[in-house]
Each structure stands twice: as structure tokens, then as C-alpha cells.
Amino acid sequence: MHLKTLTLIHYALLFGLVAFAAISYFYGVGFVGQFEVQGDPFIYIIPMVAMLGYFGSKILFKKQLETIEKSDSLASKLAKYQTASIVKYALIEGPTILALVIFMGNGYTLYFSIAICLVLYLAVQRPTKDKLIQDLDLNTTEQREL
């Protein structure tokens, strides 16, 4: 049941970002190919926040998985995995939303490109049974229960 819930959460977050990206594309100021680096602090902020979100999601996910004990029940392992995954998704979603909001205001293609890359990365993070088994290092009994 946890995998279905996590998959639903993942798809909802992904759909929300895709919808917001479409809205920012069609209702923003449009693409601006040439832009002035001077006076725009977001030229530094957006890539840094995106990198922090990307690497932070990987690091925090691994750290949270390390807290799961082999002796924990399957339900406990799944609950902790779900929490770790939601934190990972949030750390990817935050910089994506920021990049899209800033893109809507000034139309710089760099921000839209960064947002799309983060959306694609989030799409790849789709939870599957195989990933769950591998990440949690489940034994054969737990795999059958799953």
C-alpha cells in the first residue's frame, strides 16, 4: 500500500510542476534570448539553489535510508522510505518552482531550462518496486510480503 501511495504522491507533484511549467511558458513574458547579467542576482541564485536541491536530495535521502535498521518491521521500513522519498521530492520541487516563478517575471531561458532539467530528474525518481527493494535491501521474506 505504501508504494501505491508514494507513486500517487510522486505523480501529483510531477503533474503539478509540469502544469506550472506550462503556465509559466504560456502566460509569462516569453523567452528572452539576450539578457543582461549585471543587476540580476538570480543568474547566480537559481543555479546554486538548483544544485543544492539536486545534491541535497541525494544526500538527505541516503542519510535517511541509513537510519533504517535491518531489524525494523516491513511497515516501519516502508514508512521511513516514504518519508525519505517525500523529502527528496520536496528538495527537487522547491528550486523548480523558484526557477519557474523567476522565469515568468523576466523570461530568461536559463531559468526555464534549469526548471525543466529538475522536472526531468524528478520524473526519473519515480518509485518502483525494484528501487524500493534495492534501496531498503529487503530480504526474500520481506520481498514476498511487499
Image (cartoon, grey):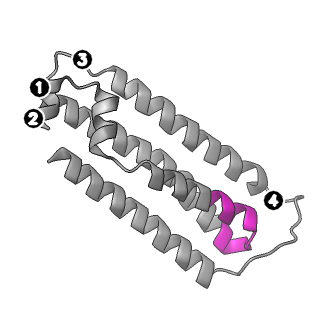
Question: What residue type is disc 4 on?
Answer: Asp
Asked if disc 4 and disc 1 are in contact, CB closer than 8 Å, the reply is no
Residue pictured at 42% horizontal, 61% vertical: 14
Q: Which residue is identified by label 1?
A: 141
Q: Which residue is identified by label 3?
A: 69
**Residue 56 against residue 2 in the figure, above or below:** above
Q: Quadrant of the C terminus?
A: top left
Query: Nearer the N terminus, badge 4 or badge 1?
Result: 4
Q: Nearer the viewer, residue 68 or 126?
A: 126
Question: What residue type is disc 2 on?
Answer: Glu
Return the x and y of residue 42 as percentages of the image width and height. Answer: 74, 56
Residue pictured at 68% horizontal, 73% vertical: 105
Query: Nearer the N terminus, badge 3 or badge 1?
Result: 3
Q: Which residues are magenta?
A: 103-115
Asked if disc 4 and disc 3 are in contact, CB closer than 8 Å, the reply is no
Q: Nearer the viewer, residue 114 or 106?
A: 114
In this rendering, which labeled residue sits more in front, label 4 or label 1? 1
Q: Which residue is identified by label 4?
A: 40
Along the horizontal axis of the image, is 96 left or right of 141?
right
Residue pictured at 87% horizontal, 59% vertical: 37
Question: What residue type is disc 3 on?
Answer: Glu
Along the horizontal axis of the image, is 36 left or right of 12?
right
Q: Alpha carbon of mark 2 to alpha carbon of mark 4: how far? A: 54 Å
Q: Alpha carbon of mark 4 to alpha carbon of mark 3: how far? A: 47 Å
Does dot 3 land on a helix, a strand or a loop?
loop
Question: What residue type is disc 1 on?
Answer: Thr
Return the x and y of residue 2 as percentages of the image width and height. Answer: 18, 45
Q: Nearer the viewer, residue 35 or 116?
A: 116
In this rendering, which labeled residue sits more in front, label 2 or label 4? 2
